[in-house]
Amino acid sequence: MAAAKSTGAQGQQAGRLFLLTGSAPLLLERGLEALLERLGAGGEEATGVTVCDAGEVSPEEIVGHIRTVPMFADRQVVVVERAEQLRAEAQERLAAAIRGAPPQTSVVLVCSASEGAGPPGRRSPVGAALTRLVEQTGKRLSYDQPRPAELPEFVARELRDLGKRMRPPVVSAFLSMAGQDLGRLRMELEKLALYVGKQEEITEADARAVVTVVAEHTVFELVDAIGEKRADRALSVLPTLLAEGDPRSAALGVLGMIARQLRLIWQARALLDAGFSLSKLEEVPEEVRAALPTEQNLLETVKSRSFLVPRYSKQAANFDDEALARALRRVFEAEMALKGQLEAGGRDELLTLELMIADLCGDGRLAVRERR
């Protein structure tokens, strides 16, 4: 199970109240399962578990479960799913009930959103009453969508669970096909494990034979359009990539792929400037290969995929070193804006990326205005 970020008091009641938040449903579900086991569910001592969905169960019923002394169990855990959907008044009543709960009772609040009101780093998906109570007497555990750069480690952990392994280039190819949704990634890895049977190493050929390519493959249309400085094409693809799931996580995933493309273009530009031909990369000497980054490496990316070479040659011709440096700086600024660490002027995820793409393409601001 992936480690969770934990915050909260360590006082007398720290084991009785938990707030679980996150934008990654798979990790959130696993975190809840691990917590229930830790609280004794399924252990030698009997523990009653009551699950209430705040979107379907009345606040009065939830409060009733919390206040009830367990009669047929040594302890009880009341799980309140979608706690962020409770109105402010209901949350205040819930906070009062938790304060007066029987000593055998633990309460777990589960929220599908990781952020709410307040400054970055202190945001909470629930209101002030419950947030204060968690800070004073409970613990908060966060299970957020990994950043694109962290997804290979997630895949590696899941593979270890399944008794399988992939080489890094195969992991990159797998992610490009399967997307970034953790539940889908786990499902596709399970399919692969069944497909290869006793074979421990999963190859790219195995992945291409089994993995269902999802809509995220259009991200390559987006990054190619940016590399070719075709703003209209890039802007037409972008909304599709942000249409499903959490917009912020989707936007950060797209941003990671754009940064990857720019780094690959920069390597292509450096090799061309040094007099090497991208169609004869096998002639690149070892000392030059060693100077290239180990991750997001151009030579590994085009290895066995020669059809990519003309694309990178063409796109490298559209950027010089200064333009690439400006582009990566602009990507960094967009990332900070999406994470709330830089003033975004009220822009949503789509507009933030649209304006960045317009800058990267150099001639796309008119297209953005027309779309608005």
Image (spheres, rainbow, N blue to C red):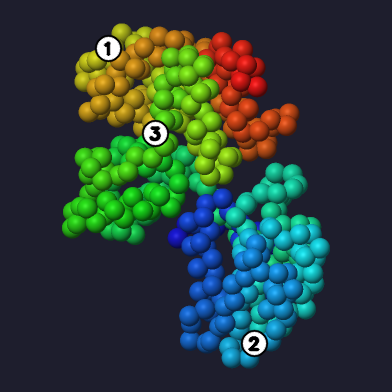
Between discs 3 and 1, the one toward the N terminus = 3
Three-letter amino acid code of the residue under disc 2: Pro
Q: Do the residues labelled 3 and 1 touch (CB within 8 Å)?
A: no
Image location (x, y in percent) of residue 90: 77, 65
Q: Which residue is drawn at 69% across and 54% down?
A: 125
SS at badge 3: helix
Between discs 1 and 2, the one toward the N terminus = 2
* Residue 240 visible in rendering: yes
What distance separates the C-alpha of mark 3 from that of mark 1?
A: 28 Å
Tag on residue 5?
A: none
Q: Quick check: 270 above or below 68? A: above
Three-letter amino acid code of the residue under disc 3: His
Between discs 3 and 2, the one toward the N terminus = 2
Q: Name the residue under label 2.
A: 70
Q: Mark 1 points at which residue?
A: 277
Image quarter for residue 76? bottom right
SS at badge 1: loop
Image location (x, y in percent) of residue 25: 51, 55
**Dot 3, how many residues are within 10 Å of its Cα: few (below 14), some (14-19), or many (20+)?**
some
Image location (x, y in percent) of residue 283: 21, 17
Q: Quick check: 203 above or below 91? A: above
Q: Are marks 3 and 2 in contact (CB under 8 Å)?
A: no
Q: Mark 3 points at which residue?
A: 217
Foreground tag (1 vs 2): 2
Image quarter for residue 314? top left
Three-letter amino acid code of the residue under disc 1: Ser
Image location (x, y in percent) of residue 357: 55, 21
Q: Quick check: 242 above or below 70? A: above
**Dot 1, how many residues are within 10 Å of its Cα: few (below 14), some (14-19), or many (20+)?**
some
SS at badge 2: loop
Q: Which residue is drawn at 65% across and 22% down?
A: 372
